[in-house]
Image (cartoon, rainbow, N blue to C red):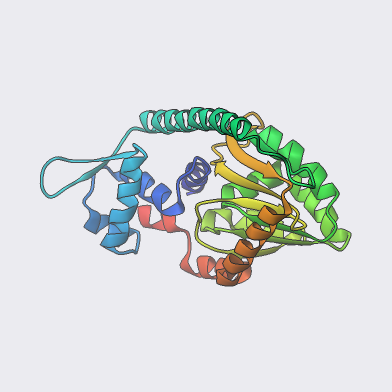
Amino acid sequence: MQTDYDFILRLIGFGLSEKEALLYLQLLKYGPKTPSPLAKSLHTYREDVYRTMTSLIEKGMVKPSLDAPTVYIAVDLETALASALAKRESELREMELLKLQLNELARQQQFQPGADGVNIKLLKSVKELVNVAKPLIDSLQEELLLAVPAPAAIIATRLGIKGTASEFVTRGGKVRVLTDISYSTIDSMHELMESGGEVRHLNQHKMPFVVFDRKIAMSGIDVEFAHSSLSQPIAALYTDDPTFAQYLASTFEILWNQGINAENRIQQLLEQGPPQADYQ
Protein backbone atom coordinates (compact mmCIF):
# COMPACT_ATOMS: atom_id res chain seq x y z
CA MET A 1 0.00 0.00 0.00
CA GLN A 2 1.17 3.52 -0.80
CA THR A 3 0.40 4.55 2.78
CA ASP A 4 2.92 1.97 4.01
CA TYR A 5 5.53 3.24 1.54
CA ASP A 6 5.05 6.82 2.73
CA PHE A 7 5.13 5.78 6.38
CA ILE A 8 8.37 3.83 5.94
CA LEU A 9 9.98 6.63 3.92
CA ARG A 10 9.23 9.11 6.70
CA LEU A 11 10.53 6.74 9.36
CA ILE A 12 13.75 6.47 7.36
CA GLY A 13 13.82 10.25 7.14
CA PHE A 14 13.43 10.33 10.91
CA GLY A 15 16.66 8.38 11.27
CA LEU A 16 15.65 4.72 11.10
CA SER A 17 17.25 2.27 8.70
CA GLU A 18 14.99 0.52 6.21
CA LYS A 19 15.11 -2.67 8.30
CA GLU A 20 14.19 -0.77 11.45
CA ALA A 21 11.30 0.99 9.70
CA LEU A 22 9.92 -2.27 8.27
CA LEU A 23 10.17 -4.05 11.61
CA TYR A 24 8.58 -1.20 13.56
CA LEU A 25 5.70 -0.97 11.07
CA GLN A 26 5.19 -4.74 11.29
CA LEU A 27 4.82 -4.53 15.07
CA LEU A 28 2.56 -1.48 14.89
CA LYS A 29 0.21 -3.12 12.39
CA TYR A 30 0.10 -6.65 13.71
CA GLY A 31 0.94 -6.36 17.38
CA PRO A 32 3.58 -7.99 19.61
CA LYS A 33 5.57 -10.85 18.10
CA THR A 34 8.54 -13.12 18.76
CA PRO A 35 11.55 -12.98 16.39
CA SER A 36 10.73 -16.16 14.43
CA PRO A 37 7.49 -14.99 12.72
CA LEU A 38 9.07 -11.58 12.15
CA ALA A 39 12.05 -13.18 10.41
CA LYS A 40 9.71 -15.26 8.25
CA SER A 41 7.50 -12.35 7.16
CA LEU A 42 10.51 -10.12 6.41
CA HIS A 43 12.43 -12.89 4.61
CA THR A 44 15.49 -12.61 6.81
CA TYR A 45 17.31 -14.41 9.62
CA ARG A 46 16.41 -14.35 13.30
CA GLU A 47 19.87 -13.00 14.08
CA ASP A 48 19.16 -10.05 11.77
CA VAL A 49 15.84 -9.45 13.55
CA TYR A 50 17.60 -9.53 16.94
CA ARG A 51 20.15 -6.93 15.78
CA THR A 52 17.46 -4.66 14.37
CA MET A 53 15.29 -5.11 17.46
CA THR A 54 18.20 -4.15 19.73
CA SER A 55 18.65 -0.93 17.77
CA LEU A 56 14.93 -0.12 18.02
CA ILE A 57 14.98 -0.77 21.77
CA GLU A 58 17.90 1.66 22.11
CA LYS A 59 15.90 4.24 20.17
CA GLY A 60 12.96 3.78 22.55
CA MET A 61 10.64 2.53 19.80
CA VAL A 62 10.28 -1.11 20.90
CA LYS A 63 10.22 -2.80 24.30
CA PRO A 64 10.62 -6.50 25.17
CA SER A 65 8.24 -8.41 27.39
CA LEU A 66 9.44 -9.74 30.74
CA ASP A 67 8.07 -13.24 30.28
CA ALA A 68 9.43 -16.12 28.18
CA PRO A 69 9.53 -16.48 25.27
CA THR A 70 10.34 -12.79 24.80
CA VAL A 71 7.73 -10.90 22.82
CA TYR A 72 8.59 -7.53 21.27
CA ILE A 73 6.08 -4.70 21.51
CA ALA A 74 6.01 -1.48 19.48
CA VAL A 75 5.91 1.68 21.59
CA ASP A 76 3.07 3.93 20.42
CA LEU A 77 4.19 6.27 17.65
CA GLU A 78 3.76 9.57 19.49
CA THR A 79 5.79 8.38 22.49
CA ALA A 80 8.47 6.82 20.28
CA LEU A 81 8.96 9.96 18.17
CA ALA A 82 8.95 12.20 21.24
CA SER A 83 11.72 10.03 22.72
CA ALA A 84 13.74 10.27 19.50
CA LEU A 85 13.33 14.05 19.40
CA ALA A 86 14.37 14.40 23.04
CA LYS A 87 17.50 12.36 22.31
CA ARG A 88 18.29 14.57 19.31
CA GLU A 89 17.86 17.75 21.33
CA SER A 90 20.14 16.32 24.04
CA GLU A 91 22.80 15.46 21.44
CA LEU A 92 22.64 18.99 20.00
CA ARG A 93 23.04 20.49 23.48
CA GLU A 94 26.06 18.26 24.02
CA MET A 95 27.51 19.42 20.69
CA GLU A 96 27.08 23.06 21.67
CA LEU A 97 28.82 22.37 24.99
CA LEU A 98 31.66 20.56 23.23
CA LYS A 99 32.02 23.46 20.81
CA LEU A 100 32.39 25.92 23.71
CA GLN A 101 34.91 23.66 25.44
CA LEU A 102 36.96 23.17 22.25
CA ASN A 103 37.01 26.90 21.55
CA GLU A 104 38.20 27.54 25.10
CA LEU A 105 40.90 24.86 24.86
CA ALA A 106 42.03 26.26 21.51
CA ARG A 107 42.28 29.75 23.09
CA GLN A 108 44.32 28.38 25.98
CA GLN A 109 46.64 26.53 23.61
CA GLN A 110 46.88 29.61 21.37
CA PHE A 111 46.18 27.59 18.24
CA GLN A 112 46.85 29.50 15.04
CA PRO A 113 45.06 29.08 11.71
CA GLY A 114 47.03 27.42 8.92
CA ALA A 115 48.96 29.35 6.33
CA ASP A 116 45.96 29.33 4.05
CA GLY A 117 43.57 30.53 6.76
CA VAL A 118 41.63 27.30 7.25
CA ASN A 119 38.04 27.86 8.39
CA ILE A 120 35.84 25.51 10.41
CA LYS A 121 32.17 26.17 11.03
CA LEU A 122 29.35 24.30 12.77
CA LEU A 123 26.17 24.20 10.67
CA LYS A 124 23.08 23.94 12.86
CA SER A 125 20.10 23.79 10.49
CA VAL A 126 19.13 22.49 7.04
CA LYS A 127 18.74 26.10 5.89
CA GLU A 128 22.30 26.94 6.93
CA LEU A 129 23.60 23.82 5.20
CA VAL A 130 21.73 24.64 1.96
CA ASN A 131 22.88 28.27 2.04
CA VAL A 132 26.50 27.10 2.33
CA ALA A 133 26.21 24.28 -0.24
CA LYS A 134 24.54 26.15 -3.11
CA PRO A 135 27.26 28.74 -3.77
CA LEU A 136 29.90 26.03 -3.38
CA ILE A 137 28.21 23.98 -6.12
CA ASP A 138 27.93 27.12 -8.28
CA SER A 139 31.70 27.61 -8.02
CA LEU A 140 32.64 23.95 -8.58
CA GLN A 141 35.22 23.25 -11.26
CA GLU A 142 35.59 19.48 -11.40
CA GLU A 143 33.81 17.16 -8.98
CA LEU A 144 31.12 16.84 -6.31
CA LEU A 145 31.16 13.76 -4.06
CA LEU A 146 28.20 12.91 -1.82
CA ALA A 147 28.08 10.01 0.65
CA VAL A 148 24.69 10.48 2.28
CA PRO A 149 21.65 8.44 3.40
CA ALA A 150 18.75 8.30 0.94
CA PRO A 151 16.48 10.73 2.87
CA ALA A 152 19.19 13.41 2.68
CA ALA A 153 19.55 12.90 -1.08
CA ILE A 154 15.77 13.10 -1.51
CA ILE A 155 15.47 16.27 0.57
CA ALA A 156 18.31 17.82 -1.42
CA THR A 157 16.25 17.40 -4.58
CA ARG A 158 13.24 19.04 -2.92
CA LEU A 159 15.32 22.00 -1.73
CA GLY A 160 16.74 22.76 -5.15
CA ILE A 161 20.27 21.40 -4.81
CA LYS A 162 19.62 18.77 -7.50
CA GLY A 163 18.95 21.49 -10.09
CA THR A 164 22.15 23.30 -9.14
CA ALA A 165 24.12 20.06 -9.42
CA SER A 166 22.50 19.35 -12.80
CA GLU A 167 23.74 22.71 -14.09
CA PHE A 168 27.23 21.79 -12.88
CA VAL A 169 27.09 18.52 -14.87
CA THR A 170 26.00 20.50 -17.92
CA ARG A 171 29.13 22.63 -17.49
CA GLY A 172 31.21 19.45 -17.69
CA GLY A 173 31.47 18.65 -14.01
CA LYS A 174 31.14 15.25 -12.39
CA VAL A 175 28.71 14.33 -9.61
CA ARG A 176 28.88 11.00 -7.78
CA VAL A 177 26.37 9.97 -5.11
CA LEU A 178 26.83 7.07 -2.73
CA THR A 179 23.63 6.24 -0.85
CA ASP A 180 21.41 3.43 0.43
CA ILE A 181 18.74 2.61 -2.14
CA SER A 182 15.50 0.95 -1.01
CA TYR A 183 12.28 0.12 -2.84
CA SER A 184 10.61 3.26 -1.51
CA THR A 185 13.35 5.54 -2.91
CA ILE A 186 13.59 4.14 -6.46
CA ASP A 187 11.83 7.10 -8.11
CA SER A 188 14.03 9.62 -6.31
CA MET A 189 17.16 7.73 -7.33
CA HIS A 190 16.01 7.83 -10.95
CA GLU A 191 15.65 11.61 -10.61
CA LEU A 192 19.21 11.88 -9.35
CA MET A 193 20.53 9.82 -12.24
CA GLU A 194 18.48 11.78 -14.77
CA SER A 195 20.12 14.97 -13.49
CA GLY A 196 23.45 13.58 -14.68
CA GLY A 197 24.84 12.15 -11.47
CA GLU A 198 26.43 8.72 -11.08
CA VAL A 199 24.78 6.79 -8.24
CA ARG A 200 25.83 3.66 -6.38
CA HIS A 201 24.17 1.77 -3.54
CA LEU A 202 25.88 1.06 -0.24
CA ASN A 203 24.24 0.16 3.07
CA GLN A 204 24.05 3.09 5.49
CA HIS A 205 27.32 4.18 6.96
CA LYS A 206 27.86 6.19 10.14
CA MET A 207 29.17 9.54 8.90
CA PRO A 208 27.56 11.31 5.91
CA PHE A 209 29.76 13.79 4.08
CA VAL A 210 30.09 15.95 0.96
CA VAL A 211 33.32 16.97 -0.77
CA PHE A 212 33.62 19.91 -3.19
CA ASP A 213 36.50 19.70 -5.71
CA ARG A 214 38.50 17.78 -3.06
CA LYS A 215 39.19 21.14 -1.39
CA ILE A 216 36.16 21.87 0.79
CA ALA A 217 34.10 19.41 2.83
CA MET A 218 31.00 19.13 5.01
CA SER A 219 30.65 16.16 7.35
CA GLY A 220 27.62 15.21 9.40
CA ILE A 221 27.84 14.85 13.16
CA ASP A 222 24.11 14.57 13.84
CA VAL A 223 22.24 14.69 10.54
CA GLU A 224 19.00 12.71 10.45
CA PHE A 225 16.30 14.27 8.30
CA ALA A 226 12.81 13.92 9.79
CA HIS A 227 11.21 16.20 7.19
CA SER A 228 12.15 18.72 4.49
CA SER A 229 11.89 21.85 6.66
CA LEU A 230 14.70 24.38 6.27
CA SER A 231 14.49 25.10 9.99
CA GLN A 232 15.14 21.49 11.01
CA PRO A 233 18.11 21.34 13.43
CA ILE A 234 21.20 19.36 12.45
CA ALA A 235 24.87 19.31 13.42
CA ALA A 236 27.39 19.31 10.58
CA LEU A 237 30.93 20.63 10.21
CA TYR A 238 32.09 22.78 7.28
CA THR A 239 35.78 23.24 6.58
CA ASP A 240 37.93 24.52 3.73
CA ASP A 241 40.89 22.50 4.98
CA PRO A 242 42.11 20.70 1.81
CA THR A 243 43.86 18.00 3.87
CA PHE A 244 40.59 16.96 5.50
CA ALA A 245 38.76 17.21 2.15
CA GLN A 246 41.35 14.92 0.54
CA TYR A 247 40.95 12.45 3.42
CA LEU A 248 37.18 12.31 2.90
CA ALA A 249 37.66 12.02 -0.86
CA SER A 250 39.95 9.02 -0.33
CA THR A 251 37.36 7.51 2.01
CA PHE A 252 34.72 8.07 -0.66
CA GLU A 253 36.78 6.20 -3.27
CA ILE A 254 37.08 3.19 -0.96
CA LEU A 255 33.33 3.17 -0.31
CA TRP A 256 32.56 3.80 -4.00
CA ASN A 257 34.50 0.68 -4.99
CA GLN A 258 32.43 -1.29 -2.47
CA GLY A 259 29.15 0.08 -3.84
CA ILE A 260 26.67 -1.51 -6.23
CA ASN A 261 25.64 0.16 -9.48
CA ALA A 262 22.32 1.92 -8.86
CA GLU A 263 20.62 0.40 -11.92
CA ASN A 264 21.57 -3.10 -10.76
CA ARG A 265 20.30 -2.39 -7.24
CA ILE A 266 17.01 -0.98 -8.55
CA GLN A 267 16.51 -3.97 -10.85
CA GLN A 268 17.11 -6.27 -7.88
CA LEU A 269 14.53 -4.40 -5.79
CA LEU A 270 11.95 -4.44 -8.61
CA GLU A 271 12.38 -8.20 -9.01
CA GLN A 272 11.88 -8.68 -5.27
CA GLY A 273 8.78 -6.47 -5.26
CA PRO A 274 7.48 -4.19 -2.49
CA PRO A 275 8.49 -5.44 0.97
CA GLN A 276 5.07 -4.30 2.23
CA ALA A 277 3.50 -7.17 0.31
CA ASP A 278 4.37 -9.31 3.33
CA TYR A 279 1.98 -7.28 5.45
CA GLN A 280 -1.11 -8.22 3.53
- Observer-nearest of 45 and 142: 142
Depicted 89 relative to depicted 179: above or below: above
Q: Residue at x 43, y 58 (%)?
A: 275
- Left or right, residue 224 beside residue 175: left
x, y percentage for residue 6?
Answer: 52, 44
Is residue 26 among what the camera can see?
no
Q: Quadrant of residue 112?
A: top right
Residue at point 75%, 39% (across, down):
132
Q: Is residue 99 above or below residue 213?
A: above
Residue 220 in percent (x, y) is at: 58, 45
Judge whether 215 appears above or below 224 on screen.
Answer: below
Q: Quadrant of residue 256?
A: bottom right
Instruction: Estimate the x, y position of residue 142 in percent, counting from the top left.
Output: 82, 61
Q: Quadrant of residue 200?
A: bottom right
Q: Farthest residue to the front: give it.
A: 109
Q: Is residue 12 visible?
A: yes
Instruction: Return the residue nearer the eye: 193 or 26.
Output: 193
* Closest to the observer, 20 or 146: 146
Q: Residue at 52% across / 32% down in the picture?
A: 98
Tell me the residue at 52%/46% (across/down). 9
Furthest toward the left, the residue is 68
